[in-house]
Image (tube, rainbow, N blue to C red):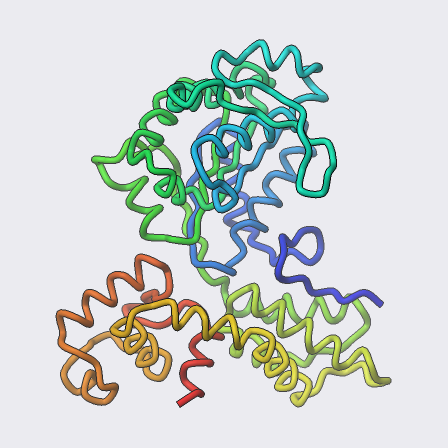
């Protein structure tokens, strides 16, 4: 029987960790041709949520195109990927490549090969001097080739546009074009919450108040427990409610980890005759998952400077609302000003978050790693 839990990739269908309310609200905003910005820490399920939104819109005849900015290395790369994704999505609707090529002034379509030698359509900027103008070309493309009122463009990890070296020019160019596209909806999402929030909430930024903001937080714990119980039930296994609560607790109620621990527990039970999950299965599942993530957790930790590492370890062992002298002494932390600087940077990177005014690490497995390694 197939494992009913999915993690590590976009989740859909019955395995999707249901976000009924935010799904309904996002669909309502997008269906009206309005833009959405969705942010939250990694592994909270943003990509899966947007994937479900696109699936439902496609079922209604929408054209949906998606570009992940983490895969973009330069301005030229962005222009090529954006144009290629749009062409792939709309070619069954609008027809030939020649038709689309005629809509460009500064971007040339070419047939090349990918890393595995397979044919691949590429779009190239005709001249390096045409960089920003080529941006305008591709941003104008959806309105020219997509069915009016039935188009969604998704830009994942949108805050990474800052790494393209254009400063606010990228944002200004895009905003100046898409604000005149009332029949096309855009979804911007990202995991660096504070970076994305500044882009859409600062009056000095081009995208100020240009999209409805949604924050993807941790789901209600009772919904998480019910999800675990029902997914086990769907394959003929019994997950006691108190053990489902243990899964949610170990996972920090982060959807990715809820799915991952449950998946390991399923594997443990599926190998035997028993169809009931035991407490030992849950603990074994958590340790198995942790063993696969240990190297990653350590690399995440070591990627930060010393002041931030000290603060991360302190918060892993003792989440707090105040960094007073007693707290700093207990955890051998530096001065208040150094701690505050480290805290701001960790929040900006979504490594630390505040829950009900208490600062804690966003990743429960990282917190476990740092709290148990001495």
Expressed as whole percent of the image width and height from the top left, the position of residue 237 reads: 78, 75
Name the quarter where the C terminus is drawn. Answer: bottom left
Q: How many marks?
A: 0
Name the quarter where the N terminus is drawn. Answer: bottom right
354 vs 79: above or below: below
Expressed as whole percent of the image width and height from the top left, the position of residue 20 reads: 57, 51
213 vs 110: above or below: below
156 displayed left or right of 172: right
Expressed as whole percent of the image width and height from the top left, the position of residue 171 reads: 34, 31
89 vs 104: above or below: below
278 vs 175: above or below: below
Q: Residue visible at 21% across and 35% down?
A: 204
Q: Residue visible at 50% across and 62% down?
A: 219
Q: Residue visible at 34% across and 21% down?
A: 176
Q: Residue visible at 60% across and 14% down?
A: 101
Residues 290 and 227: in front is 290
145 displayed left or right of 132: right
Residues 198 and 84: in front is 84
């Amino acid at each position: 029987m197939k494992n009913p839990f999915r993690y590590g990739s976009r989740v859909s269908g019955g395995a999707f960790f249901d976000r009924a309310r935010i799904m309904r609200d996002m669909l309502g905003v997008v269906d009206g041709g309005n833009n959405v910005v969705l942010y939250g820490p990694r592994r909270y399920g943003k990509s899966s949520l947007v994937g479900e939104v696109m699936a439902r819109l496609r079922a209604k005849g929408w054209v949906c195109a998606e570009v992940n900015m983490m895969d973009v290395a330069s301005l030229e790369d962005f222009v090529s990927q954006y144009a290629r994704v749009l062409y792939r999505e709309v070619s069954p609707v609008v027809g030939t490549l020649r038709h689309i090529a005629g809509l460009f002034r500064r971007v040339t379509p070419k047939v090349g090969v990918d890393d595995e030698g397979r044919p691949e359509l590429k779009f190239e900027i005709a001249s390096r001097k045409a960089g920003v103008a080529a941006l305008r070309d591709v941003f104008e493309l959806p309105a020219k080739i997509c069915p009016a009122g039935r188009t969604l463009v998704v830009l994942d990890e949108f805050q990474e546009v800052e790494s393209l070296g254009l400063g606010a020019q990228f944002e200004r160019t895009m905003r100046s074009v898409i604000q005149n596209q009332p029949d096309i909806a855009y979804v911007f999402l990202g995991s660096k919450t504070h970076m994305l929030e500044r882009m859409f909430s600062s009056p000095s930024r081009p995208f100020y108040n240009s999209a409805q903001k949604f924050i993807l937080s941790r789901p209600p714990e009772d919904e998480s427990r019910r999800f675990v119980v029902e997914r086990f039930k769907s394959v003929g296994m019994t997950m006691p409610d108190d053990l489902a609560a243990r899964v949610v607790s170990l996972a920090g109620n982060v959807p990715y980890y809820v799915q991952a621990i449950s998946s390991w527990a399923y594997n443990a039970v599926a190998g035997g005759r028993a169809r009931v999950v035991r407490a030992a299965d849950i603990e074994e599942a958590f340790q198995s998952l942790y063993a696969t993530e240990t190297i990653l957790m350590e690399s995440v930790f070591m990627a930060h400077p010393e002041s931030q590492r000290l603060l991360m370890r302190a918060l892993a062992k003792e989440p707090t609302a105040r960094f007073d002298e007693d707290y700093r002494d207990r955890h051998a932390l530096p001065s208040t000003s150094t701690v505050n600087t480290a805290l701001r940077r960790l929040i900006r990177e979504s490594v630390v978050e505040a829950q009900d005014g208490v600062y804690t690490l966003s990743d429960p497995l990282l917190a476990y790693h740092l709290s148990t390694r001495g």
